[in-house]
Amino acid sequence: FCQTLLQTVFPPELRFASVKLFNRISNWFSSYCYFDITEIDGVNTNELYNAVQLYLSSSVSITGSRLSLTRALNSSAFTFGLSNNDCIIDTFNGVNVLWEHVVTQRQAQTFSWRALPDEKRGFTLRIKKKDKSLILNSYLDYIMEKANDIRRKNQDRLLYTNSRGGSLDSRGHPWESVPFKHPSTFETLAMDPEKKKEIMEDLEDFANGQTFYQKTGRAWKRGYLLYGPPGTGKSSMIAAMANYLGYDIYDLELTEVHTNSELRKLLMKTSSKSIIVIEDIDCSINLSNRKKTNNSGSRNCYDSGAPEMRGGCGSGSGEDGGNSVTLSGLLNFTDGLWSCCGSERIFVFTTNHIEKLDPALLRSGRMDMHIFMSYCSFPSLKILLKNYLSFEESDLDDSVLKELEKVLDKAEMTPADISEVLIKNRRNKRKAVRELLEALKLKAERNAKNGGLKNGDDVEEEEQEKRALESPKEEFDFEETLKEGGDQDNIK
Ligand SMILES: Nc1ncnc2c1ncn2[C@@H]1O[C@H](COP(=O)(O)OP(=O)(O)OP(=O)(O)O)[C@@H](O)[C@H]1O
C-alpha cells in the first residue's frame, strides 16, 4: 500500500530529481570531495585502479581484518587487498584520506565487443576539500610510483637474451626472456666484506639517485667492470646485483649482433631498472687491434675516435659494410645519446683479461667502477664455510683457521674451486675442512714449484700454449726426416 502510495505521490522522475538535489545540497555543505576510480574506464582497463589496489595492499596487510588475497601471473608473492565495500584511511604528507573499495552488480550488458565482468569494481577516494589541490596530483603520482615498486618486487625478474641471430619474436621483440631465479645474493657472495659493502652502497646510491642525476645533468646509468680469473664469482656478482636491486637482466650476446644499428635497436628495447650485461667482453669482439694504422698511414684508430673491431680501422661511421660491431658502436651503446633512452640502467662488462681491453672502454664515465674479483681470501673463505657447511668462525679450532689462513694466499684458489671441495664433502663437515686444507697445501706447493704461477686454469692455458707452439716443430722434424730419407717405418 505504502509502495503504491509512494509511486503515485513520488513518481520515479521526481524521486531521481530529489536525490540529485539532495546530493548537490549535501555536497555543498560537505567538507569532503570524492573521486571515483573505476576498474574499467569505458572498455579499457584503468591503470590507476590497479595501481591503487597494489599501493593499498602494502598498508592493508597490517591493518585490515577481512582481506582479499591474490597472486598474479609470474609473481612469487601474494597481494592483500581490501575486500568488497571496505574502507581504509591512508596518510600522505600529514593529510588523512579515506579509500573505499566499492563493488556493485553490473546491470545486464548491452552489446559490447568486450565481455565485461559481472561486478563493477572501483575505489572511491575521499579527501577534504581544502587538501584537494594540495595533495591530489602528488599523491596520485606517489601511488603510481609505489605501485611500480611493489609490482617489481612481487614479480619474478626476467633474464633476457638476444641469442637468436638478430631474429624477432612474434611481438617484434629482439629479446627473449625466461624467469630469472639465480639464488646468488650479496650475503652468499664470497668476497671481502668491506668491498662488498662499498659495492652495495654504490648500488643503493645509484638506485636512489634520480634527483642527483637530474641535478648534475648526467644520464641515470652506471657502468661496472668485473674482472678477474675464471671462477671468482663475476656471474654470481651480477646475479647478486640484480637480486639486490630487483632489476631484470639483459644478457647481451655480442657475437650475435651484426651491426652497430642492430646494437642500438637492442638497447632501445631494454626497459629501465635493468642490468645490461656483456660477459667476457674481450672474447665477444676483437678489442686488440685499435692501434693498427690504416694503409694510408693516417693516425691510429683510437685517435680517429672510430676504431674498427673486426679487420682494422674503418670509416668514421664505424660500420664495416654494415656487418660488424665496432668499438665506437659499443662506446655509443654505453655512453652516447642512445644510451640515455630510458633511465636507471646499469651496464656490466666482465672479462678475465682486463689487459686486453681498450683503454677507451675503461676510462671513467664509461665504466664507473672497476671491481677486481680475486682468488679466495680469508674473509671470503669464512663466508664459503658458512654457506656450505654452516660453520661459524667459532666452530673451528684456532689452529685450523690459522693453517687455512697461512696457506690460502699461496694456494691462489678461486671460490669456485673451494666450493667444489666443500660441496663434495658437505655431509662430513670435519672431513670437508681437512680435504680443503690438503687441497690448498697441494696447490700452494704446486704454485711454489711453478714459481708462483697462478691457478689451475692459467697453468692449463700455458700448457696449451706450449703444446700449440710445439706442434709445428714436430711437423718440421717430420719434413726434415723425409728430406734426409730417414727410416721409412718411423716416417709412417
Ligand atoms: N665469490 C664467490 N662467492 C660465492 N660463490 C662463488 C664465488 N665465485 C665463484 N663461486 C661459485 O662458483 C661458481 C662459478 O662462479 P661464477 O660463474 O660466478 O664465476 P665467474 O667469475 O663468472 O667465472 P667465468 O669467468 O668462468 O664466467 C658459482 O656457481 C658459485 O657457486
Image (cartoon, grey):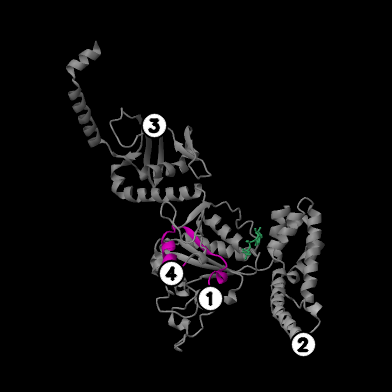
> Do tag 3 and tag 2 residues touch (Cβ < 8 Å)?
no
Q: Secondary structure at mark 4?
A: helix
Q: Quadrant of the C terminus?
A: bottom right
Residue 484: assigned label: 2
- For disc 2, the neighbor class at 10 Å (few under 14, some 14 to 19, many from 20) is few
**446 part of magenta stretch:** no
Q: Is residue 199 visible?
A: yes
453, 60: nearer the viewer: 453
Amino acid on which disc 2 is placed: Glu
Q: Which residues are magenta?
A: 258-285
Q: From the top left corner, tell me how far across and down residue 128 is, in percent.
A: 31, 41
Q: From the top left corner, tell me how far across and down residue 461 is, in percent.
A: 69, 72
Q: Secondary structure at mark 3?
A: loop
Give the mark nearest the N terminus, 4 or 3. 3
Residue 287: assigned label: 1
Residue 118: assigned label: none
Give the mark nearest the N terminus, 3 or 2. 3
> Do tag 1 and tag 4 residues touch (Cβ < 8 Å)?
no
Q: Nearer the viewer, mark 4 or mark 3?
A: 4
Query: Where is 71 relative to 292, above or below?
Result: above
Residue shown at 35%/30% (left/top)? 104
